[in-house]
Image (cartoon, rainbow, N blue to C red):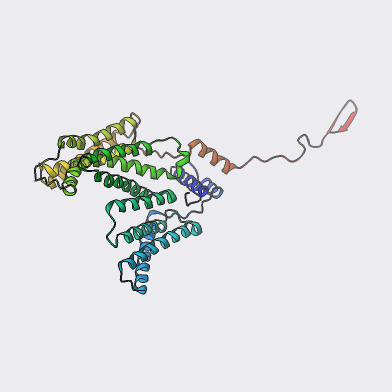
Amino acid sequence: MIAYNKQSLDNLELQDQLEDAFNKNFISVQELNLCKEKYPSKLYSPNPFVRIGLFILTLIITFCTFGLLALMVQLSSENGISGMLIFSGIISYIMLEIMIKANHHYKSGVDDALMWASIIFIVTSLNITGSFSALMNAVVLFALSIYFAIRFANMAISAVACISFLAVIFFTYIKLGTFAKATVPFLLMGISLLIYLVSSKKTFQENRKYYAKCWLMAEIISLVSIYTCGNYFVVRELSNSMFNLNLQEGQSIPFGWLFWVFTIVVPLVYFITGISKKNMVLIRTGLTLIAAIVFTIRYYYRLLPAEIAMALGGALLIIIAYTLIRYLKKPKHGFSDILINKKSFASKQLESLIIVQTFGQAKTNTGNATEFGGGTGGGGGAGGEF
């Protein structure tokens, strides 16, 4: 189902590991080049700066082409513009497939831009007339994004797929009435937890190795979603605006204390659990969401001026980071400041591959295995040739 050549993907991953080994002075440049020649990859995947440039350039060309076609056809009705947008979305997708098959683009910026252009054209076309509801938009966006995520294994698209899926659940469930509106945060937290448990499962990695980054993104989105659905600020303000609670300043939502506890405790649970399990996703997510705790508390309780609070918080983070870096110069309790690059390809396999490709196979002797050199031998008057 994936659009890219799987052998080229495997070879590209192997080349990345070889580059990392070379940068750490584990192998020589000759060994690196020899292995790359043996395991070539046709995929075009430039550095991040070129990728960004190609992404912007492709979007400009795509949208300018659409504008030129719209001027040539002189569209005036909403249905005509909608049809042109759908046509442009389909053409963008066809061009995407061609660029991958013919030119072997892989995360080059060109394929990323054509992916987004196709989705934007199609979703925009459905909203030109204004007859599409939020639920229908979420359904269409989920269908498009899940297809593109499976077909092209794109991290950003997989994030859109997760968010749009949760949006489908949200807009469907709130139609059930007042009770559904009151309990929708808990439903979304439960579904997000289920997504996390599935996406973080480490079994059958070989069968889904091409989607490893997509599953990682789903894991991150689900963790953030669990917290967002229970954050006091999000629940109160969305309930006030979408469900017409008409809360005045200082008024709390029902069970507000529960959401306050959730707001403060969950990031700390992420962080502590990440440390105990040595899970960097949980650690980084927890650290990031600690900032959300500060924002939420400050929004309702302004203890210090903003500039003083930001200065104190920044100074505290710098001190903590510097202390941890100094403390973890030598590994302690399984943690270290040294970056360890873990790849799916085992280090012993990589070492064996380098040795084989560097020294080659041993030469085989094609002659007589018992052939000796000439010589004479004699003794006691005897003589002969051996």
Q: Is residue 60 visible?
A: no
| Residue appearing at x 45%, y 45% in the figure | 210
Against 333, residue 218 (above or below) is below
- Residue placed most toward the observer, 8 or 379: 8
How many numbered markers are drawn? Answer: 0
- Residue placed most toward the observer, 36 or 45: 45
Q: Quarter-wise, where is residue 375 in the image? A: top right
Q: Position of residue 334 (x, y in %)?
A: 35, 30
| Placement of the C terminus among the 4 image quadrants | top right
Farthest-out residue, right: 381
Q: Position of residue 348 (x, y in %)?
A: 50, 35
| Residue appearing at x 30%, y 66% in the figure | 78
Q: Is residue 245 visible?
A: yes
| Residue appearing at x 77%, y 37% in the figure | 368
Q: Is residue 369 left or right of residue 206?
A: right
Q: Position of residue 19 (x, y in %)?
A: 46, 46
Q: Is residue 369 left or right of residue 170?
A: right
Q: Is residue 383 left or right of residue 118?
A: right
- Residue placed most toward the observer, 230 or 274: 230
Q: Position of residue 223 (x, y in %)?
A: 30, 39
Farthest-out residue, front: 176
